Amino acid sequence: PYIIRISNLCRYYTMGDQTVKALDDINLDFRRNDYAAIMGPSGSGKSTLMNILGCLDTPTSGRYELNGQHVADMDDDELARIRNREIGFVFQTFNLLPRLNCLRNVELPLVYAGVEPEERLERARQALEQVGLVDRIDHKPGELSGGQTQRVAIARALVNHPSIILADEPTGNLDTATSHDIMEIFSKLSDAGNTIILITHEEDIARFTRRIIRLRDGRIESDSAP
Ligand code: ADP
Ligand code: ADP
């Protein structure tokens, strides 16, 4: 029942006669409901791993299976579909459009997916409800606190009902109390069946998850409960 299976995965960067092993023989599985933090010093391979998990980058060698399908065998259309429907992305800097209100920001992935306007609004509202933000529907990102803004970004990531949420330092710009609220939202989402994988530098944040994967020099140093 693994949603993600990674075996003997390597990602090398070659520049001139130098090769950097950003990921070096990684074996890693994730189940539905997993709530995992990826930790490790700068340069240990965290971003590279997230980019591969998000189908934004391809490994040099090894296998990545998503829902039993080999990602390497997928064509561009299938990869685009996976990135839009199966995976929701959340970023440290939120990446919302400043001129659109919350509802329109959250609705945007559904516009790209070709969903009808009425259904779009209904689903955007539902996603905002999931993150506890229905009362701010008409506000623009600049009119919200950092925590509220990140909730909108999470709602946008959820609106296509993805099975996996990938978050790169989602609490990096938030104060402690707000960060904890965001981690609780992810916890509820994982209980509801989403696979949540996030990068963080902070032990205090990682302990909200159920699994901490530590990378060092492109290898898994440890993988255990907090
Ligand atoms: P983080 O803040 O997550 O540790 P980095 O600052 O290491 O991320 O990297 C930011 C981005 O720059 C990443 O997308 C990564 O792929 C890219 N990058 C990192 N190191 C190099 C490098 N030596 N040459 C080119 N691009 C790099
Ligand atoms: P982290 O996110 O943990 O800081 P990265 O995955 O960004 O680590 O980087 C892992 C290693 O790969 C580092 O040595 C980095 O310099 C290198 N690297 C990352 N992206 C690139 C790139 N686009 N070109 C060359 N080297 C890269």
Image (cartoon, rainbow, N blue to C red):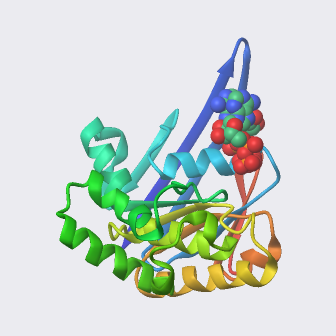
Apparent side of residue 53 relative to residue 142 in the rendered image (left or right) = left
Camera sees residue 210: no
Q: Please determine whether, in this image, residue 187 is positioned above or below residue 39.
A: below
Instruction: Name the residue at 55% across, 55% down.
Output: 98
Q: Please determine whether, in this image, residue 147 is positioned above or below residue 216.
A: below
- Counting from the top left corner in percent of width and height, residue 156 is at 44, 66
Camera sees residue 94: yes
Question: Which quarter holds ligand 1?
Answer: top right
- Counting from the top left corner in percent of width and height, residue 95 is at 57, 54
- Counting from the top left corner in percent of width and height, residue 218 is at 71, 45
Quadrant of residue 111 within the rendered picture: bottom left
Instruction: Name the residue at 28% across, 72% down.
Output: 121
Instruction: Name the residue at 68% across, 70% down.
Output: 146
Quadrant location, the N terminus: bottom left
- Counting from the top left corner in percent of width and height, residue 51 is at 55, 46
Quadrant location, the C terminus: bottom right
